Image: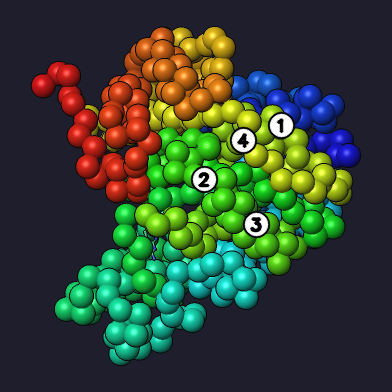
Amino acid sequence: MFKKVLIANRGEIALRVIRTCKEMGIKTVAVYSSADADSLHVRFADEAVCIGPAASSESYLSIPNIIAAAEITNADAIHPGYGFLSENAKFSRICAEHGIKFIGASGDQIDKMGDKATAKETMKEAGVPCVPGSEGILETYEDAVTKAREIGYPVMIKATAGGGGKGMRAILEQSELKSAWDSARREAAAAFGNDGMYMEKLILEPRHIEIQIIGDSFGKACHLSERDCSVQRRHQKLVEETPSPFMTDKLRKKMGEAAVKAAEYIAYEGAGTVEFLVDKDRNFYFMEMNTRIQVEHPITEQVVGFDLIREQIKVAAGEPISGKNYLPQMHSIEVRINAEDAFNEFRPSPGMITSFHAPGGHGVRLDTHCYSGYAIPPYYDSMIAKLIITARTREESLDKLERALNEFIVEGIKTTIPFHQQLVKDKMFREGVYTTKFMEDFVLENPTE
Ligand code: MV4
């Protein structure tokens, strides 16, 4: 087992990893930017190294600075958390070259899944269901016209370097294709320096349902059931729950088997997520694979009963997995609390938290790095807490969520708590009949108007 793990991240996930390391008797090294000197991850780690100024590009994204911190402190592994360098193939390879275990995917696996057209081809080879569409990249606009006719409108074009909706366009009829093609390519070139595009049949009002998997260094993988992440706004997840209200035992078995097949085909090592689009008839299609621990991993931990960070560390250290799959024994829901003004387009609201009271009680877990007197820096993402509720049924979870939100006090900044308080009372949400289109139709009432 590792003796010392460096956590190449900040915020709640850095704390989350430190906690598990402590329970496992592993020493921890925090790294921090000058904007995070007062952060709890710095306080709670055994050692802390300042790796640069506030700008992420010169601190949390600086490979030389992080490797230097690991070498100085003699860390034998690096946990990257999510975001930042967690899906950076170059960083994974550089860690390996320095004899530091990267607790995550190999450079080759990250490369394979990071290029979406390649990922899709690989999954098709593995026998995982994919949306009908182009085989690989479309070379010219004329190729796109031909392919769209062949697939049949409506279609979607996607940037191969994309993800998170950038460089992606829905096209309902041929008259829209030219301008969509040009603007998506331009957007992809500017955002990723890669304007490669591929095409798929458009799935109307899909659900976003993902399967958590874990693979070991012996080529064996298992799944830990699904998370429904359909409640999103501009490709930012707001709420995740498991089991999905749309799931059936039969569909879970099929999607779970497909996700395990995907992982074993590439001999995936570590925790990963296979994302699927699910249509109204419960057909499911591979969308993307995330080669990292995700923000929403706690709901899975709550319903299967174990610590995913511990499992990540164990497989990274060469331990085998048990080999069986895990089904949800409870219901769990996570709401992301962001320092944002929900009544003003979810505009970021950084600044000093003057008062902070965490909700508690049975079935309530709060993963956060915040406290009264903590100043949220403006340089990083706006998530300040994850409220994770667990109960025997969805109904009990939602009642408990409503109760917990009502006792959650954050003063000094705007948060998305008021949004969640309205969401939890929404009829459609309560009934569990929501798709990725849900937030487009959701009307938030502004109590001050
Ligand atoms: C789609 C789709 C419909 N049909 N692909 C959005 C992010 C990117 N990773 C893939 N996305 C989509 N791909 C086909 N063929 C609809 C979406 C989509 C979406 C997917 C998951 C969650 C939220 C979404 C919001 C808008 C569009």
Q: Which residue is mark 1?
A: 306
Residue 129's spot in the image, x, y percent?
54, 67
Q: Quadrant of residue 24?
A: top right
Residue 337's spot in the image, x, y percent?
42, 27
How far is mark 1 from mark 2, CA to CA?
23 Å
Camera-side residue of 247 and 348: 247
Identify the element where label 4 is drawn: loop
Mark 1 is on which residue type?
Phe
Q: Which residue is mark 4?
A: 328
Q: Residue at x 67, y 33 (%)?
A: 304
Q: Which sits earlier in the primary sequence, circle 1 or circle 2?
A: 2
Q: Which sits earlier in the primary sequence, circle 3 or circle 1?
A: 3
Q: Which residue is mark 2?
A: 248
Q: Which sits earlier in the primary sequence, circle 3 or circle 2?
A: 2
Callout in the foreground (2, 4): 2
How far is mark 3 from mark 4, CA to CA?
16 Å
| Left or right: 27 as drawn, with respect to 431 | right
The crowding category of the residue bearing disc 1, from other C-alpha atoms within 10 Å (few below 14, some 14 to 19, many at least 20), is: few
